[in-house]
Image: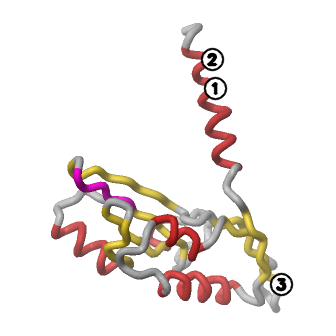
Amino acid sequence: MKKSFPLFILSFFLFILTSFSQETLKKNYTTFGDFLSEQKANIALIENDMTIDKTKEIMGPALIVNVPKIGRMKALSKVFKQPEHYNEYNKDPQKKITILWYFTTPKDQNGIITKSECTPILFENGLVIGKGWKFYISYKRANRLLLR
């Protein structure tokens, strides 16, 4: 018990350090739709055989999205991680599957971003093999992967 507590504290501080070390960019948009359009336009630039690093460069760092109050719409200032979700699977030693999920499609306005509100980009051994829900579902079925 005594040995595990310092290890826990060290792990906790490393987690906090890595969580807050991601660069964050503050951007102002006229409407929330402008932010979503930019996300979709950036995803359209991603092509097969691109690296994860190049993909992350195109999508940019975490964003603080600011949208002014318009009519009855409230002003918005929210952080969006880039990517929102990240998964990694090792089907076998020769095949590492990575999925980056980028926010593009708001469904629930509860402040929680689920994968169903994101566009998946799939990588095999660090290179893009496809993107979007159609590709994700067909890849999942064809490879009998238990992706979530």
Q: Is residue 68 above or below residue 119?
A: below
Quarter of the rendering occupied by the N terminus = top right
At numbered mark 3, what does the secondary structure look like: helix, strand or loop? loop
* Other residues around mark 2 within 10 Å, as few (<14) / some (14–19) / many (≥20): few
C-alpha span from label 2 to label 3 = 47 Å
The disc labelled 1 sits on which kind of residue? Leu
Horizontal and vertical percent position of residue 135: 30, 78
Whole-percent x and y of residue 75? 81, 78
Residue at image coords 16%, 69%: 142
Residue carrying label 1: 10
Mark 1 surroundings within 10 Å by alpha-carbon count, few (fewer than 14), some (14 through 19), many (20 or more): few
Q: Main secondary structure of the magenta part?
A: strand
Quarter of the image for residue 12 reads top right
Camera sees residue 57: yes
Per the model, the C-alpha gap separating discs 1 and 2 is 6 Å
Secondary structure of residue under mark 1: helix
Which tag is nearer the camera, tag 2 or tag 3?
2
Residue at 48% in and 72% down: 118
Q: Is residue 95 magenta?
A: yes
Q: Which residues are magenta?
A: 94-98
- Between residue 12 and residue 95, name the one nearer to us: 95
Real-space Cα separation, disc 1 to disc 3, in angstroms: 43 Å
Task: Tell me the kind of residue under disc 2.
Answer: Pro
Tell me which numbered mark, 2 or 3, is placed earlier along the sequence: 2
- Classify the position of the C terminus by image quarter: bottom left
- On screen, residue 129 versus residue 81, left or right, reads left
Q: Do the residues bearing badges 1 and 2 touch, measured as CB atoms within 8 Å?
A: yes
Q: Which residue is mark 2?
A: 6
Q: State the scheme by which the image is colored.
A: secondary structure
Question: Which numbered dot is residue 69?
Answer: 3
Q: Which mark is residue 77?
A: none
